[in-house]
Amino acid sequence: MSPGSKNNPFPAKKMILAGRKQYLWLRARMIQAMRLFFIEHDYLEVETPQLIPAPAPEPHIHAISADNLFLHTSPELCMKRLLAAGYPKIFQIGKCFRHAERGNLHMPEFTMLEWYRTGIDYMALMEECEDMIRSVSRRLGADNKINYQGTEIDLKCPWERLSVSEAFDRFVSLTPETAIGKGIFDRVMVENIEPNLGMARPTILYDYPAPLAALARLKPENKRLAERFEIYFAGLELANGFSELTDAREQRARFERDRKQRSDLDKQVYPMPEKFLKALEKMPRAAGIALGVDRLAMIFADRSEIDDVVTFTPEEV
Amino acid sequence: MYNASDLRKNLKIQIDNEPYVITEFRFSKPGKGQSLYRCKLKNMITGVILDRTYRSGDTFEQAVLEERKMQYLYNQENEFCFMDVENYEQVFLSLEQVGDAKNYLTDNLEVDILLFEDSPIGITLPNFVDLAVTRADPWVKGDSVAGDTKPVTMETGYVLRVPPFVEEGGKLTIDTRTGEYVTRVKE
């Protein structure tokens, strides 16, 4: 049936889908460019299972269950098992699934790019992420300047480095620790801090309070902070990376803490990821990052809604 | 009872025993943090706008609203009287509550009256109404300011611009959503 046919039962939807063509082309070219970057940098592309028995017990990320298993919320645990098994540079582009996340930046099924590399820490990974996005931008012909929702963002190095405590100091009269104590850290982040980040150039927000890191290493010189960072473009959160925690005992303790928190929040408590914890004993020093592919496509396509850069939204399937 | 994850644009909830409609909605989830549901809410009685951020675990009472078919009877000192077509009960709306709908109210017009806990709070008109023209001046050709239209006054006092061929005494169909002329009514 042709799109203009009178017998078409969903003309409006057809129009919306057809209208996304230029963004879907851009998205496809962007993913090809990402892949090329990692291939040129000797990364192995992997596909880990999406159906897993034990997701990481993040307090605020909820898995969708399927056939007595779970759809993964991120490929993190399986990819780290690969690091431990002797794969030093790996990347994956694939679907992840999170229950009840829907908004102009969220879909319960979305595409994630994750990459992991042994022998580096979060600072080196920040630089690699800058290189990767600059390389993608060049290949898309956007060069070093992109315009996102009226904000011109310069990708030329170096991107702004702003610690979480500096950000709280600059934008609100609170410390991150006080905000956590009052239970308003996330709200302050969303309402007062995030809208200011990544305005003239991308911002890398780093050194999160230790309680906000499930799988990141703590700073050796300051155990109250974790070596974790997030990347922002014009207020939009794009990626989350960290130096990986490699202490299996410490990891087990954090999982116990998070499992208890899930139970206190009346959320399903997943089985302990024992195979991951076993592998962690042999995992070398490494850093890894997860980047929202749909969101990067939104940035390059200058769209404010995630709906515009996917083939079908959950409501349209 | 609604949960935070049920919130969305146009949902009607109760806050402090008053009905609110969500006019803007934004789902946020910073980093690995908790889900936040940011809403702009409009009080359906006073029109006051609130900004609120809710979290998972928050719950809400549904605003129990009812629409009833009623007939417009009369307006006395800006109190508009309507009668329920089933039980003949009469209710009143203020000028403020009626708003622009007053331009289209003619005797016995059937409308939907919105009630919150049995108190009338709003009105929904039919999309199209027929009104009589009570005053129409002859069209002055070449009046470039007005273009090819002229002003007429309807039986309700509503003034709008219509094509030059409209005459006094005729009836017009008007779109109540835009306030614009649609066509002449052939009788």
Image (cartoon, helix red, strand yellow):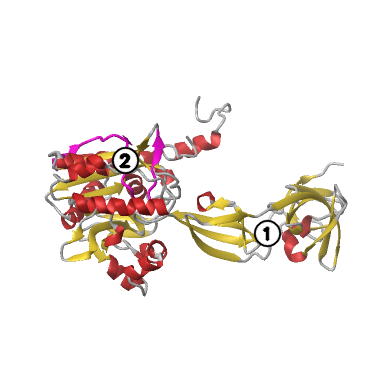
- Residue A54's tag is 2
- Extreme residue toward the top, this view: A1
Q: Which residue is mark 1?
A: B144
Per the picture, the main secondary structure of the magenta-coloured stretch is loop
Q: Are marks 2 and 1 in contact (CB under 8 Å)?
A: no
Magenta-drawn stretch contains A47: yes
Marks 2/1: CA–CA distance = 75 Å
Secondary structure type for disc 1: loop
Q: Residue at x 25, y 34 (%)?
A: A47
Magenta-drawn stretch contains A125: no
Nearest to the observer: residue B167 or residue B107: B107
Q: Residues within 10 Å of mark 1 (few under 14, many from 20)?
A: few
From which residue to which does the magenta span run? Answer: A38-66
Q: Is residue B186 above or below residue B89?
A: above
Nearest to the observer: residue A94 or residue A137: A94
Residue type at tag 2: Ala
Residue A252 on image: x %, y %: 25, 50
Residue B7 on image: x %, y %: 54, 52
Q: Is residue B117 above or below residue A32?
A: below
In the visual, does A237 lie left or right of B149?
A: left
Note whether residue B131 is visible.
no
Residue B117 on image: x %, y %: 73, 57
Secondary structure type for disc 2: loop
Q: Residues within 10 Å of mark 2 (few under 14, many from 20)?
A: many
Q: Residue at x 38, y 51 (%)?
A: A262
Residue A4 on image: x %, y %: 53, 30
Kindly report which numbered mark, 2 or 1, lies closer to the viewer in this rendering. Answer: 2
Residue type at tag 1: Ser
Nearest to the observer: residue A314 or residue B97: A314
Q: Are marks 2 and 1 on the same chain?
A: no
Note whether residue B89 is visible.
yes
